[in-house]
């Protein structure tokens, strides 16, 4: 039996963990006696993690504060909460069939925070996601960056830009997914023409707004779509671009150069074929790792060695679930498979934590266990790259959001009757939104 309850030694430790309240505390909590993997810095065999009011107060081989509540983790493993740079949990949907480009559409307005997919992601140790509409459009809408807190509304989960607006990027796609009949593009050439024309309109809109200098009588009629594209042109919003084939990847890099966009390439099945070009462009990649055959023809050369090839070329690499394409509960497996494909262990662990955080403009808050960062961390019962390892607990902002010893949480982690009640999936290529 693999269950936590079948191991008496683990049960003792779990009982101690369960004694902690779930809400952030005014008092300090010091976790001790664990193997600490901070990601930034060397692992610590007998580490200490001190949290206070949702933040990391101290971490590493540090003294335990005399006024802290002490929890001995008894040899467990603690590492940062996982960050997924590309997910579709929450039954998110974006643009519809009325056209190929929908920059005005917000994923924020289409997420069900009570969808069990969010709890399943917590069960996989994921604490932050970039939740995106699908790739069935050249531009399907604005993504939303969420902390996977237990919340009643989307506002309880969404992160925000410094100006208070919901944080997120722009989701774009090329290749076969958005190639359809009119009004969609039927060829790769026409697809890029439509995209370039839309960005040119956004540049013209920006120029008119700037020329008006705040005079209401001179401002152009407000255009929500062109405003969003303007935020991509200014660098506020990152363009998260679905792309598989080597020629499609290079098309995105041309677009990036022409308009000065901040781009993250997603999936990059053929990334190993153009690794030098991606590295020269300084563009990071969010890679999907799939261990089974099938899928679309343009992903025929997808390889578990892609991550290793990109890292060797000097590319910043993260992994993503593309949930429901791969299961959020098994996100650590992506790192393990990449190591099997030749990626260094340290790089693979960074690819599910700090590298994704940096790609989401959150590297100063999440992705590693560093004093001053958010208290987002997970407790494991073994090596993070072992297939036998379970996520025991997930903490977000100093709040425990998943505990494997809780019957409901355990159901979301392991599956079974009722585990998916209320969960809706979104698909990319079959008339609905998705990957």
Image (cartoon, grey):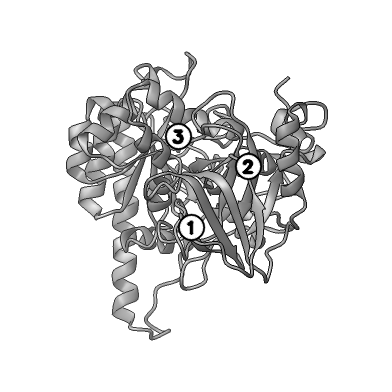
Confirm whether residue 258 shows in the render.
yes
Pick the residue in front: 145 or 135.
145
Q: Is residue 76 left or right of residue 293?
A: right
Tell me: residue 170, above or below residue 328: below
Instruction: Read off the residue under disc 1.
Output: 59
- The mark nearer the N terminus, 1 or 3, is 1
- Residue at the image point whose x is 53% and y is 28% from the top: 429
Q: Splitting the image into 4 quarters, where does residue 252 fall?
A: top left
Identify the residue shown where x is 58% and y is 39%: 75
Residue located beneath label 2 in the image: 74
If the image is split into quadrants, where does the N terminus sit?
A: top right
Q: Residues within 10 Å of mark 2 (few under 14, many from 20)?
A: some
Left or right: 139 as drawn, with respect to 155:
left
Q: Nearer the viewer, residue 349 or 331?
A: 349
Residue 409 horizontal/vertical position (percent):
75, 40
Q: Secondary structure at mark 3?
A: loop
Badge 1 density bin: few <14, some 14–19, many ≥20, Cα 10 Å: many
At 58% from the left and 62% from the top, the residue drawn is: 51
- Tell me: 20 left or right of 170: right
Q: Secondary structure at mark 2?
A: loop
Determine contact: label 2, label 1, CB under 8 Å.
Answer: no
Label 2 or label 1, whichever lies nearer to me, is 2
Q: Nearer the viewer, residue 377 or 105?
A: 377
Secondary structure, mark 1, is: strand
Marks 2/1: CA distance? 17 Å
For the residues bearing labels 3 and 2, Cβ distance under 8 angstroms: no
Residue topped by disc 3: 182
């Amino acid at each position: 039996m693999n269950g936590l309850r079948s191991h008496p030694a683990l049960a003792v430790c779990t009982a101690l963990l369960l004694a902690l309240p779930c809400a952030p505390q005014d008092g300090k909590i010091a976790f001790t006696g664990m193997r600490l993997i901070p990601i930034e810095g060397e692992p610590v065999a007998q580490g200490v993690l001190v949290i206070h009011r949702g933040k990391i107060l101290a971490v590493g081989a540090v003294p335990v504060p005399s006024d802290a509540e002490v929890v001995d983790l008894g040899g467990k493993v603690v590492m940062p909460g996982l960050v997924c740079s590309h997910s579709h949990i929450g039954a998110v949907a974006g643009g519809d069939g009325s056209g190929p480009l929908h920059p005005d559409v917000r994923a924020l307005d289409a997420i069900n925070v009570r969808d069990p997919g969010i709890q399943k992601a917590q069960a996989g140790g994921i604490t932050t996601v970039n939740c995106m509409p699908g790739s069935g459009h050249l531009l399907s809408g604005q993504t939303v960056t969420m902390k996977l807190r237990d919340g009643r509304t989307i506002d309880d989960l969404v992160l925000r830009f410094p100006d208070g607006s919901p944080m997120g990027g722009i989701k774009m796609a090329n290749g076969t997914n958005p190639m359809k009949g009119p009004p969609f593009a039927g060829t790769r050439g026409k697809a890029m023409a439509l995209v370039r024309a839309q960005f040119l309109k956004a540049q013209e809109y920006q120029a008119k707004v700037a020329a008006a200098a705040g005079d209401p009588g001179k401002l152009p009629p407000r255009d929500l779509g062109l405003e969003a594209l303007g935020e991509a042109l200014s660098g506020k919003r990152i363009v998260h671009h679905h792309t598989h084939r080597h020629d499609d990847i290079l098309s995105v890099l041309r677009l990036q150069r022409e308009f000065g966009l901040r781009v993250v390439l997603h999936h990059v099945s053929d990334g190993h074929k153009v690794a030098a070009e991606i590295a020269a462009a300084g563009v990071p990649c969010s890679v999907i790792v799939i261990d089974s055959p099938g899928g679309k023809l343009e992903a025929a050369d997808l390889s578990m060695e892609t991550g290793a090839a990109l890292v060797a070329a000097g590319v910043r690499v993260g992994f993503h679930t593309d949930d429901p394409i791969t299961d959020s509960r098994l996100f650590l497996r992506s790192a393990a498979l990449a190591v099997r494909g030749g990626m260094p262990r340290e790089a693979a662990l960074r690819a599910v934590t700090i590298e994704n955080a940096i790609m989401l403009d959150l590297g100063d808050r999440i992705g590693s266990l560093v004093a001053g960062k958010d208290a987002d961390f997970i407790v494991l019962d073994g090596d993070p790259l072992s297939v036998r390892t379970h996520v025991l607990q997930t903490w977000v902002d100093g709040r425990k959001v998943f505990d494997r010893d809780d019957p409901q949480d355990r159901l979301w982690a392991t599956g079974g009757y009722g585990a998916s009640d209320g969960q809706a999936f979104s698909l990319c290529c079959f008339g609905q939104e998705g990957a």
